[in-house]
Image (spheres, coloured by chain):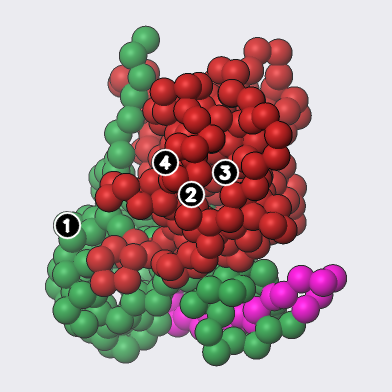
Amino acid sequence: MALDKNGIAQRIAQELKHGYYVNLGIGIPTLVANYIPNGIDVEFQSENGMLGMGPFPIEGEEDADLINAGKQTITAMPGAVYFDSSTSFAMIRGQHVDLTVLGAMEVSDQGDIANWKIPGYMVKGMGGAMDLVASAKNIIVAMMHTNKKGESKLLRQCTLPLTGTKCVTKVVTNLAVLEITEKGFKLLERAPGVSVEEIQAATEGRLIIEGEIPEMSL
Amino acid sequence: MALNKQVANAEEAIKGIESGMTIMFGGFGLCGIPENSIAAVRKNGAKNLTCISNNAGVDGFGLGVLLESRQVKKMISSYVGENEEFERQMLSGELNVELIPQGTLAERCRAAGAGIPAFFTPAGYGTEVAEGKEVRWFDGKPHILEHAFDASFAFVKAWKGDTAGNLIFKATARNFNHAMAMAGKITVAEVEVLVPAGELDPMEIHTPGIFIQRIYQGDHFEKRIEQRTVRTK
């Protein structure tokens, strides 16, 4: 069974380590906050200017002055702090954030990522994604393995305008966990019940399969 | 005696705005936007403005009201996906749009206020953002040259302020307001609560009054929420 979006988020949450500062992008990455493993503490950075982001507010407690980078109303955890945008990106560019999780439209087998523009169709802008991918040490992409037309999103070369080059470290999709290596996507884990052949068929970029590929444990 | 930056209202605060100027607007989405100053610029009618703002508002609110009245010639932003009128003007070529990385946007504001004419950043290297820009390698990594902004006016919004121009922001409404306050040749701050100099605790001030030329208490703050998201108890 291929994973759904929550399953992808749940698998990525296993990458969280105690003491991490984490920046979660919009979409599937946001869901990662729902699956923090027991016994570890992490703090979420929101690039619009806070550390210690908490869950959505209870109805009636929304505050127009307290939002996340997706413009959603949120809450603050004990120990949270607010700061201005230039300080926020100093944290990001200065590599003070330990893990970044982003959505993507395409990822290449060298770790290039495209997620901000489809020429002639959608131009919303890159927001903070270009700053994040240019500087972060550890970037995990959360996305579906194929697009709505069934075409692979894990490519030899990205076809869409790039957000950053050679920056992605890992990709977690509905089918697999893959690590970016110099020789391409190294298959680390399969989604429960998904075969190596299915993953191969859905991957256009170079795929490295070494030995038995274990199933994810969720 | 503390300097007095107080002006009576938004109309007085925007004096000097002319067609063709470059203007910064603080805020992230609709959070912390200078809504009273935006309304005054709309009333003033200045045209062909270049607006620097992380976002472009929504239809009928925020910078959306200046797009509606066709006062904006060019937008410099990082993310603009929330406004249909914006999209229409962009696709029809009426509106010139420059999209830049959010951290670069913030730093180009900060640099302008800090006397740094340009800086190198890794953000955007290898993408279309880097086209035509000088590249230099530092510590084995490529960086692109970005320049400080040059804005005649900066409009910012704070929660509390005093007559000396010192500002305190609420929660994530600080966002671009601080760096833009530093950057404007004339920075206008609108606040929800304006108090006499001396009433704010100097240890709690976020933006020092030296960056502010004019300050006023806004008549009305709608503070619209863009994405109301809640959980059940």
In this view, the residue in front, A86 or A171, is A171
Say which residue label 1 marks. Answer: B60
Q: Which badge, 3 or 4, is on the more N-terminal residue?
A: 4
**In the displayed structure, would residue A214 be above or below residue A100?**
above
- The answer for how far apart the CA atoms under marks 4 and 1 are is 35 Å
Give the green chain's letter.
B
Give the residue type at disc 3.
Answer: Val
Quadrant of the snapshot with the C terminus of chain B: top left
Residue stretch rendered in magenta on the structure: B137-160
Q: Which badge, 4 or 2, is on the more N-terminal residue?
A: 4
The residue tagged with tag 3: helix, strand or loop?
strand
Q: Quadrant of residue A42?
A: top right
Q: Which mark is residue A171?
A: 3
- The answer for how far apart the CA atoms under marks 3 and 2 are is 12 Å
Give the residue type at disc 4.
Answer: Met
Residue A81 coordinates in the image, percent (x, y): 63, 37
